[in-house]
Amino acid sequence: MDIEAELSSVFSQRSSGPFLFLGSGFSRRYIGLEDWEGLLSRFCLTGKPYAYYKSSANNDTPKSAQLIANDFHDLWWGHEDYIQKREESAHLINDRTSPLRLEICDYLQHKHLTEIPPIILEEINALKECDVDGIITTNWDMFTESLFPDHTVYIGQKELLFSNTMNIGEIYKVHGCCSVPDSLVLTDSDYHDYNNRNAYLASKLITIFVEHPVVFIGYSISDTNIRDLLKSISLCIGRENIDKLRDNLIFIDRNEPVGGPTIETSYLQFDSIQIPVKVVKTKNYTPVYDAIAQFERKLPARVLRFCKERVYEIVKGQNPDKKIAVVDYDQIQDKSDIEIVFGLGVIGKVGETGYKGISIGDIFEDLISENKNFDARKLVDTTISLLPNQTKFVPIFKYLRELGINSKAEYESSGIKLDRLINRKAEDFATANPIQTTRYANTPFAEFLAIATESEIVSMTPLLPLADHRILGDYLRANYDHLISCNNRYHFRRLMAYYDWKAYGFHAN
C-alpha cells in the first residue's frame, strides 16, 4: 500500500493543514530519550531502585515521581555533586519537587543523539519540510522547537488557556517544557491540577480537532492521556457532531505488518460514543511526512499566523487605520514587521510579484499543456524557489532549459540553488518496488501503457528500462484532465516530474 498517496488524498480534502500531536515515542525515536519511567530511573540515586518507588506508589507513575522527588530533594541539598548547581539555582527552589525538576530539565536541554541512523536522519529532514499548521505535544524536551523554529510556543496548560492563540503556526506544550522547570506535569499533584482543567483544554482545542487532520506520533492508541483528552473533546462537541472527527484523527504505529505498511480503521470507544480513527502501521515515517509536506498553501503558516493575530488586534483596537500596511510576505521575519497584510504576493506589477501566487498545479499544467506562457526566469527565481518546502516533486528542468541551462555544470555555475530538485535518479520518482516491475521489463513501453492498470503506470513507469519520454508525454497529455483529479493524483504528479526529468533533465550530460 502506498501510504503517502492515501494520506495525501486525505489531507487534500481538508481546507486546513495538518496538526501534529507528539508524544514520548517521538522523542525516543529521534533524540534517544527514555520513556517516562526510564527518565525517572535516572534520578533514583539514594540507593533505592525505581522498582521500590513503583511498588510503593502501587504502580502509579506520577506518585512514583512524587516519592522520588521527596528523596532526591534531600540528596540534592546535601551531596557534593550538586554544590555548583545549588549556588546557581537555589533561588529557583519552591518546594520539595524543585530539585528533581531542575535536574530533569538540565538533562533534557543537553540531550541529543551523537550518531543518527540514515533512516532517522531521512525522516528528520523530511519532517523539517512540513509546513504544519501547528503542534501539540506532551514532551518536555525542545526538539520540536528545533524542527519548527518559526512557530510560537505556549508552555503549559495555563499559558495556553489564557492566551489568544491563533491555531496556526503555534506549538502547544501542554505538559510543560524543560525551559521552565515549574511547568512540568510530573507528580500526582501536577496531574490532579492538569486533569481538573482538562475540560477547559479540550474546549480550547476543539476547533483544531474538528477543522484539521491531527497526526499522532509517539503515542499508543490506548494512551490514557490521549483517550482522556479525546473523550473530553467528544463530550464537548456532542454525539450529533462526532462524525466531524471522521478521518481527522490519524495515529502512526511503528509496528508494521510482515506484508508491508498498512492504513487501517479503528475506533475509540467512550461510553456509548465511537470515534473512528486511522492507524498507519509503518516502520518508515518518511512517506507520512512527505504526504504532510504536499499539503498546498499559498502562504507559510508563520505568515498566516501573523496576519490572523494582527486582524484580531485590529478588531479589538480603536485605531485600525494606524495598523494597516502592505508588505510582500517574503520580507516578513517577525510579527513586529507587520500590523496586517492585504494583497499578499500581488503588490506592484502583477507580472513580477504575482509569480509568488502561482500554485504548483499551475506549473504541472504548463508542463503538460504549455498554456501558461510563464517567464522562466521569474518562475524559477520567484515561484519554484519557494515550492520545495511543500513538495519534492516539481517540474524544473523544462524551465532551466528555457533559460539556456543545458547541463549540470551550467546549472552549478548559474547561481540557482535547487539541488534538492536537480540531483535525481529515475527510482526517486517511483513508488513501486523494483521486483514488481520485472514482468514488464521487456515489454515495449506503448504496450505497457495499453495493458497496465492506472496504478501500475503511475507507480512503475520510472523503473522501466524501455520507458520513452515522447510516448509518456502523449499519454500524459491525453489523460491529464482525468488523472489530475483522481485518487492517484499525487502519484501522477511524481510521474509528471519524472517526465520533466526524462525529457529535459541533465542525466544524459
Image (cartoon, grey):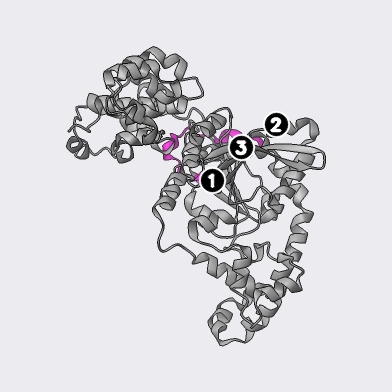
Q: Is residue 32 magenta?
A: no
* Residue 265 lies in quadrant: top right
Q: Which residue is mark 2?
A: 244
Sequence order check: which comes first, mark 2 or mark 3? 2
Mark 2 Cα-neighbour bin, 10 Å: few <14, some 14–19, many ≥20 = few
Tell me what residue is drawn at x 73 percent, y 63 percent. 190
SS class of the residue under badge 3? strand
Identify the residue at the far front of this view: 439
Label number found at residue 256: 1
| Front: mark 1 or 2 | 1
User: In this view of the protein, which residue sits in the foreground, 197 or 270?
Assistant: 270
Three-letter code for the amino acid on which mark 2 is drawn? Lys
Is 383 on the left or on the right of 102, as rendered? left
Is 181 on the left or on the right of 335, as rendered? right
Give the x, y percent position of residue 313.
62, 40
Real-space CA distance between mark 1 and mark 2, rounded to the nearest whole angstrom = 28 Å
Identify the residue at the far right of this view: 272
Region rendered in magenta: 312-336
SS class of the residue under badge 1? loop
Sequence order check: which comes first, mark 1 or mark 2? 2
Give the x, y percent position of residue 191.
74, 60
Q: Is residue 334 magenta?
A: yes
* Residue 414 lies in quadrant: top left
Q: Which residue is mark 3?
A: 264
